[in-house]
Amino acid sequence: MEAIRLETQSASAWETNRRRDDRFFRGALAVTAAITALWLGFVLTGREGGPILGRPLDGEAVGRVFVGLVVMAVLWGWLWYGLKRLLLRKLAGLSKQEVDGVFLSRMRQPFDLQAVLRSRAERRIRIADMIGRRGRFLTVGMAGYFYIYARIAREPRADFLVMGLQESLFDALAFSWVMLATYYSDGFLGRVAYGAQTRVMDGTLGRANCLVILTLWSLFKFFMVPLGFELASVFPPSTYATLFAIVWVSYLGSDGLSEIVGSLWGKQKLRVWGIGEVNRKSLAGTGACFVGSLAICLSLVHANGLGLAWVGLAVAVSASNTAFELFSPRGTDDFTMATANALLCWAFGILVY
């Protein structure tokens, strides 16, 4: 009788979370459609250039976005999906059937996270989650951002500061539509698109968490275009490269370090609210977020010979990164951290310059 009762409770919890998955999908669809409609409105009316959306798109830009989708959404995703499968089998000790269930959408049949965790080391599952997630995006993201940083340092122009963000926004929207199209898919594309990025520890809400992150990332890029031009109008060109890295690289690096250190050494005792069945963080990960952000920002300030005021900005951005990484609902911290960084830099520029 006890086993039947537990099975009934598990099925009821799964159905509740499955309905939440549907709501998150509809919300992400509405937001992505709204941003796409606004972007298309500017493009079709010929107002896509300048301080609204940056440089107009050309054939080369569209080609770069297409190649990026093929590489990131398919080839690179397939590589890390395969590695995560291997880690879940060999490191975490999951059976082949359990691993197969992890990489399905988890919305078409009950997914019992507690049964997966039973008699398994939770830390090893977290490590497999972390390697898949951070391996897929952190490696490419940091390489791309450091390339842009070096390019801005060589030629500090305002359109470089905002990364020609119309292309960047187009790329984010295209990727969001791919993720929306594969959200419920249990086939190859669904597993490749979501496999490396979706946490086992989020249970049935794994794809919802991933989709919300990507949707808010598109929203941030939409906001960042006009804000980027505002930053360019406030700061001298000689600071553009440092400014870009403080906004983008400090966020990406500190967020990644938080999960890496927390997964490897942290004790997951800090309960947080967010999208997932298990929502906990660690003091070790939180500390790594602040130290990593501060190290990145201070290195940038020192390398570019900037004054004491910039040291204060480095501390403020690092404190902001840490606070928003810890207190933002899980699934939203990418948006809140990056947005807060940009706004802090804008306020700093107004006060100092």
Image (cartoon, grey):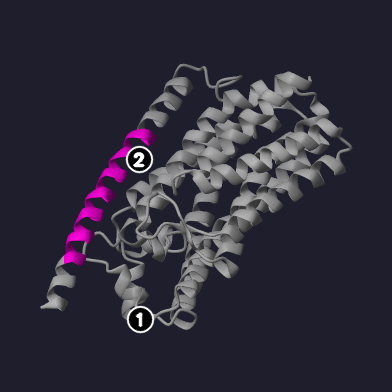
Kindly identify which residue carries mark 2: 28
Q: Quadrant of the C terminus?
A: top right
Kindly identify which residue carries mark 1: 96
Give the structural element (helix, strand or loop) at label 1: helix
In the rendered image, is residue 348 in sight? yes
Residue 23 painted magenta: yes
Side of 34 where 313 appears, left or right? right
What's the residue at 62%, 39% (across, down)?
320
What's the residue at 48%, 71% (across, down)?
84
**Could you say where residue 53 lies in the image, as x and y percent from the top left?**
55, 25
Side of 200 where 167 appears, left or right? right
- Front residue of 175 and 248: 248
- Front residue of 222 and 9: 9
**Could you say where residue 35 lies in the image, as x and y percent from the top left?**
42, 30
What's the residue at 71%, 42% (across, down)?
148
**Residue 97 position by quadrant:** bottom left
Side of 44 where 324 appears, left or right? right
Q: Residue furthest right?
A: 305
Q: Is residue 253 above or below residue 244?
A: below
**Could you say where residue 325 lies in the image, as x and y percent from the top left?**
55, 47
Mark 1 belongs to which amino acid?
Answer: Lys
Q: What segment is highlighted magenta in the picture?
A: 9-32
In the rendered image, is residue 54 in sight? no
- Front residue of 307 and 146: 307
Cα distance, mark 2 to mark 1? 32 Å
Residue 216 painted magenta: no
- Front residue of 20 and 132: 20
